[in-house]
Amino acid sequence: MEIILLERIAKLGQMGDIVNVKDGFARNYLLPQKKALRANPQNVKIFESKKAKLEIDSLEQKKEAEIISDKMKYLSVIIIRQASEGGQLYGSVTSRDIAKSISDAGYKINRRQIILNSTIKQVGIYKIKISLHPEIIKNIDVNVARSPEEARIQLSNSLDDKKIDSNNKKTDLKDDKQELSVSEDFFENKELAETAKENMKAEEITESAENQISSNEESN
């Protein structure tokens, strides 16, 4: 089916592009979500008459998405589920579950904004993408655990891994020092800046996660 895109769609095109997609994808998603119109002479005229407003609306929505993305900078959510000793969930964590957890944290998100290739079936910390706008994709951590205590342990292990990775990067930077024609002071300042940023990020992630764990324990 040929359609006119009413917004940017990843791997399809930009607003106003006429593209060919599978009938099911158009009927079940693009058309009902008002992300596209059937490509015919009448709808081309409709799009052209609304194009300026659509562009303005998209720009405003993008600015709002950027503000939300900044507020969600260190957001991580915890989902408690029953699982076997090996960590296999009895059931799974879906995009709906993740959207609810994010909404409970104070951000209005629906399941269609969660980019999840497959449901989560094992405990652990997962990097999940959220579509706040066609041009704004936000990554957050989803900590799936059997208990608040396990969530704490997983978070601690994750932060330890990040510290090790950060130290390895600093070691690589020192090894490459002699090969780059820049001042020694530049490297020292950069190292200090990177270390400070890593520490600040770790502290904020820990504080956010600890607050959520405490909230989960109180609700239980």
Image (tube, rainbow, N blue to C red):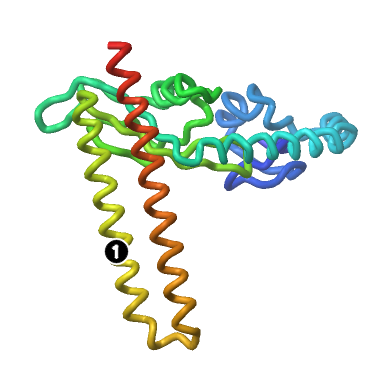
- Residue at position x 41%, y 26% from top? 98
- Residue at position x 82%, y 30% from top? 43
Q: Where is residue 79 shown, x and y percent of the image?
A: 32, 25
Determine which residue is flagged by label 1.
Answer: 167
Q: Where is residue 91 shown, x and y percent of the image?
A: 25, 21
- Residue at position x 28%, y 24% from top? 92
Say which of 61 and 33 sits in front.
61
Say which of 159 and 82 sits in front.
159
Secondary structure of the residue carrying tag 1 is: helix
Q: Can you say whether 139 is above or below 209 in the image?
A: below
Q: Residue furthest left?
A: 85
Say which of 41 and 16 sits in front.
16
Name the kind of residue labelled 1 in the image.
Asn
Q: Is residue 122 left or right of residue 137?
A: left
Q: Is residue 49 left or right of residue 120?
A: right
Quadrant of the frame with the N terminus: top right
Say which of 192 and 150 sits in front.
192
Q: Where is residue 178 shown, x and y percent of the image?
A: 38, 87
Q: Is residue 130 left or right of residue 133?
A: left
